[in-house]
Amino acid sequence: MLTYFSKVLYVLEGKRKGLVLLLFIFTLTSVLEALGIGLIGPFLSIAGNPESIHKISSLNWVYQQLKLQSTIQVVPILGIGIAAIFCLKSLLYFLSWAKIYQYSADLNQSLITKLLSAYLTVPYTFHLNRNTANLIKNILIETTTFTASCILPLLKAAVNLIVLLCLFLLLAKTDLLLLAMIMVILLPIFILFNLLGNKFKKWGKIKSESKQEMVRILNHGLGGLKETRVIGCESYFQEQMANKAQQFAQADSLFSTSQMLPRILIETALIVFIMLFISLSIIFLKQDMQEITGIMGVFAIASMRLIPAASQLFSSINQLRNSNYAVNMLYLDLKEISIQGVNQLAQLPADSSANSAVNSSKERAKTLTFSGSIELDRITYSYHNSPKLAVEDISLKIKKGQSIALIGKSGSGKTTLVDIILGLLEPNKGDILVDGKSIYNNLRSWQNMIGYIPQSIFLIDDTVERNIAFGVSDLAIDPVRMDKALQAAQLEELITQLPKGIKTEVGERGVRLSGGQRQRIGIARALYHEREILVLDEATSALDNETERLVSEAIKSLAGTKTLIIIAHRLSTVEHCDRVYLMEKGHVIQSGSYQEVVVSKMGA
C-alpha cells in the first residue's frame, strides 16, 4: 500500500499542498461531529432529570452565571448549543466537499494538460513503441479514473477514517466493552473485503484494458472506413467491439455490485447487535433504564454516522484497489517520460560541442542562423535494444539553396538519417553543424528552420486555410504569407475551384481532396511557416504519374530559393537535385551528381 501511495504522490506532483488544507478541514469537521454526538447522551439524561446538572461542574457554573430560576431552563440552552455545533459542522462539511470536488476537477484538468504536454514533448523514441490508442486512453480515461476512482476515494477514506477514529474515542469513553464487541463484529467484514482485494485490482485492469481496446477498434474501424466498407468487414469490428464492451460491462458490473456489500453487511450487523444488546441488558443484566437510554442514545446516533462512514471507508479502499492499474499506467508513463528527458540530455553527442552547450543557458538561448552550410559530422545511431547500427559514421555537407537526394533500398537508413536531421532522434555519436554551430545548442531554433513533407500529409478536419496555417490561431493568420504559399505550391487554381475557396472544409484526413492536392497543401504549409529547409520524405511516391509531375514541378520551382533534402524511391523525382547520396545498410556508399550516381549505375 505504501508503494501505491508513493505512486499517487508522484502523479500529484505540484498539487500536493491542497491535500493538507483539505485534511485539516476534515479533522475539524470530524471533531465537531464527535463532540455534538457525544453531548447527545448527557443531553438526553439531563432532559429526563434536570436536577443532575448540579453534578456536572461545567453546567452548574453556566446555571449560576446565567442566574437561571430553574434547572429546566438549562435544557433548551444545552439543546441550542448542540444544534449550533451541528450547524457549524454541517457548514464545514458542505464547504469541505465542495473543496474536494473543486480540487478533483482542477486536478483532472491539470493531469490531462500535463499528460498531453508530456506526450508532445517527450523524446521521439518514446512513441516508436507506443500505441496511439493507449495514449488517448491515458489522457481521456485514465486521468478521469485517477481523480474519480483514486483521489476522491482517497480523500473520502481520509474523511471517514478521521470520523471513525473520533467516534471510536467517543464510544470508548461511553462504554468500552460495548465498543469492543462492535469491533469484533466488524472484524470479519474487514477480513472478507481484504481477501477480495485482488479481485478489485483484476476488475480494474480488465476495465482499463478493454477501454484501450475499444479506442483501438474505433481507430481502426472508423479510421479506415473506406477500406472497411469496400472489403465488407464491418461485422469484424462490430464483433470485436461487442466482445470488449462485454468484458468492460462484466467487470464494471461485478465491481459496482460489490460496492453495495459494505453498507448492507455493516448496517445489518450493527442494528442486529444493538437491538439484541438492549434487549438482553434489560432482561438479564437488570440495568437501569435511564442509564441504558443515555448510553444507547449515544451509540444509536453514533451508529447512524458510523454505518455510512465505515461502509464508505470500505468502498473507498475497494475503489483504490480497483484504480491500481490506472495509477500504475500514469505513474509509469510520467516516470518514463521524466527518465527519457534526463537521458536525452545525457546522451547528446559526446564528441561534439553539443555536450558543453547543453550546460550553458546562454548558448541555448542563441538563435541559429543559416547562411552557409549544414554539415553532418560522423553521424552514428542505433535504436534502443537493437544490436545493429541504423546509420554509421555518415558525413556530408549541404550548402544553402542546394537540393540533395537520399536514395537506396528500404532499410538502408534513409528515414533514420532524416529523423536525425529533423531533430527527432539524437545520434549516439557525431554532430550536426549549421554554419559551424551545433544544432543542439538550440534544437527548437533548428527545427523552426525545417518544413517536413511526408508521403502521407496529416490534415486536420478543418478548412484549407487552417491546414496550411497549421497551429496558428485565426487572428494570427497572415494573408500575405498565405497568398505567397498558395502561389509557390501551385494551389491557386484549386482554390478558385473549391466551393468556399480557402475556407472550404477538407474533411477528416483530407478525404475531400486528391492525393496530389493534399501533398501541395503540405508544401504550402511548410512555405507559409517560412521554413528555409524542406525535407520531403517520399512525398510523391504514392501519386500517379500526372499528379507526381504537378507536385514535382511545385518542388522544382523551390530549388535555389529553399534548401531541399529529398528521400525518394522514384529516381525520376531527383533528377534536378544537385547531389545524390546512395545509401546501403546505414552507410553512404556513393555520392555525386544524378548522372554520376543514378545514370552510371543504371548503365552499368
Image (cartoon, helix red, strand yellow):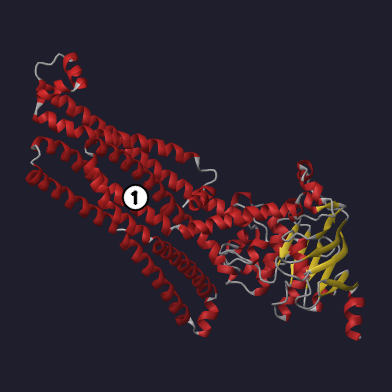
Q: Is residue 169 left or right of residue 326?
A: left
The extreme front residue here reads 285
Graded by Cα atoms within 10 Å as few (under 14), some (14 to 19) or many (20 or more), the crowding at tag 1 reads many
Under circle 1, the secondary element is helix
Residue 470 point in image, percent of width and height = 64, 58
Find disc 1 in the rendering and name its residue.
313
Q: Residue at x 53, y 50 (%)?
A: 11
Residue 344 point in image, percent of width and height = 71, 55
Compared to 112, does 504 lie above or below?
below
Compared to 6, does 139 lie above or below?
below
Residue 83 point in image, percent of width and height = 21, 31
On the image, which quarter does residue 24 sit in? top left
The amino acid on which the numbered mark 1 sits, given as a three-letter code, is Leu
Residue 547 point in image, percent of width and height = 71, 77
Q: Residue at x 20, y 54 (%)?
A: 268
59, 189: nearer the viewer: 189
Q: Residue at x 45, y 38 (%)?
A: 20
245, 64: nearer the viewer: 64
Compared to 136, does 587 lie above or below?
below
